[in-house]
Image (cartoon, helix red, strand yellow):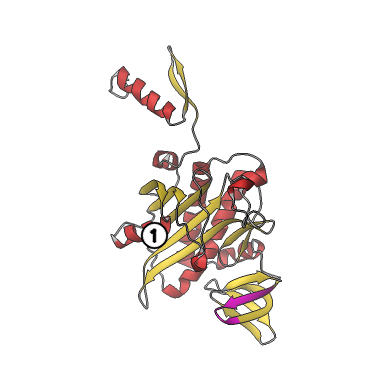
Amino acid sequence: SEALTVTRQVVYDSIAFLRGCGYNIEASRSQGYRLISSPDSILPIEIAAGLECKTLAGQIFAYGKIDSTNLKAHCYAKNGFSEGTLIIADCQKKGRGRMGRKWHSPAGKGLYFSLILRPDLPPGRIAGLSLITGLALSRAINKITGINTTMKWPNDILYEKKKLAGILVELAAELDRVEYLIVGIGINVNFNKKDFPLSLQRKSTSLKIITKKEIHRAMLLQNVLVQFENLYKNFCRHGFKYISSELIQNSAVIGRQVALSTGKKKITGKAVGFDDSGGLIIKSKSGLRSYAAGEVRLK
């Protein structure tokens, strides 16, 4: 209490509050208090504690329940909030994936968050950001759990062909400049099989199902942010040629026969690489061609 210049009662009340929030705190009459363990919480204090980022998560807005972190992030971005602002929720009522698909987001089971970015890049280079984000997720997941994942272009993280995480990049741009963009990420962290709807149980998985243990969500998020900040800075400066070999090694589609749907058009062939903008290069009967977007199915 003397070090904090507060009364002993304030310290006692604060400890009681933290214990009520799930923090395991040991008390000693001679030595004071010691933190034994913290809960699996996404409170800003848990996210910011020890976070080694210079730009990301400078401002954190955490919600218990929200329609969609991407929708909320757009509101903050339109009101001028800075690059790196983080919006996170324990539960999403209307979580979204690509093409309007729903992202299943029950409370306490996953990481559902969005970042506001304001890169000095032309809109044509933004497509590559999904690849950078996917690589950051794969690196962070490997560091925390030791498991190796793959990325199904353009936005899914897979483990043994089952979806583990997803990415949704949305932007507001003029013809030659990006006003802002939102990177939305959903990770199935501590789901049990029964936590997925029946329609998803055969094609989705979670870190808990894979590792058979609970994963501390704030710790995983910190690792994702650190990995992403490093990759994002280098991507803005140099593109991703410097990590092209890692992207290819991490890909679930390169070297495979694929069917790509782009609206009413369907292309079949072999995925052979990525172009400088993050587009997928497919070798078909008509030759080599790059595609900036679409839905890929492995054959």
Is 14 positioned to the left or the right of 159 in the image? left
At which x and y percent is residue 29? 42, 12
Camera-nearest residue between 124 and 160: 160
At which x and y percent is residue 8? 32, 18
Camera-nearest residue between 196 and 34: 196
Q: Quadrant of the N terminus?
A: top left
Where is 148 relative to 277, above or below?
above
Where is 223 relative to 180, above or below?
above
Camera-nearest residue between 93 and 151: 93
Which residue reaches farthest front? Answer: 198
The residue to which callout 1 is attached is 71
Q: Magenta segment range?
A: 258-265
- Tell me the crowding category of disc 1: few under 14, some 14 to 19, or many 20 or more residues within 10 angstroms, Cα based: some
What's the magenta bit mostly, secondary-structure-wise?
Answer: strand
Q: Is residue 239 visible?
A: no
Where is 57 relative to 132, above or below?
above
Could you say which quadrant of the image residue 144 lies in? top right
Camera-nearest residue between 287 and 155: 155
Which residue reaches farthest bottom? Answer: 286
Q: Is residue 255 visible?
A: yes
Task: Say what amino acid the circle numbered 1 marks.
Answer: Leu
Residue at figure coordinates x 59%, y 51% from the top left: 196
Asked if the magenta segment contains residue 68, the reply would be no
Could you say which quadrant of the image residue 165 lies in? bottom right
Residue at figure coordinates x 60%, y 76% from the top left: 261
Q: Quadrant of the C terminus?
A: bottom right
At which x and y percent is residue 74? 36, 61
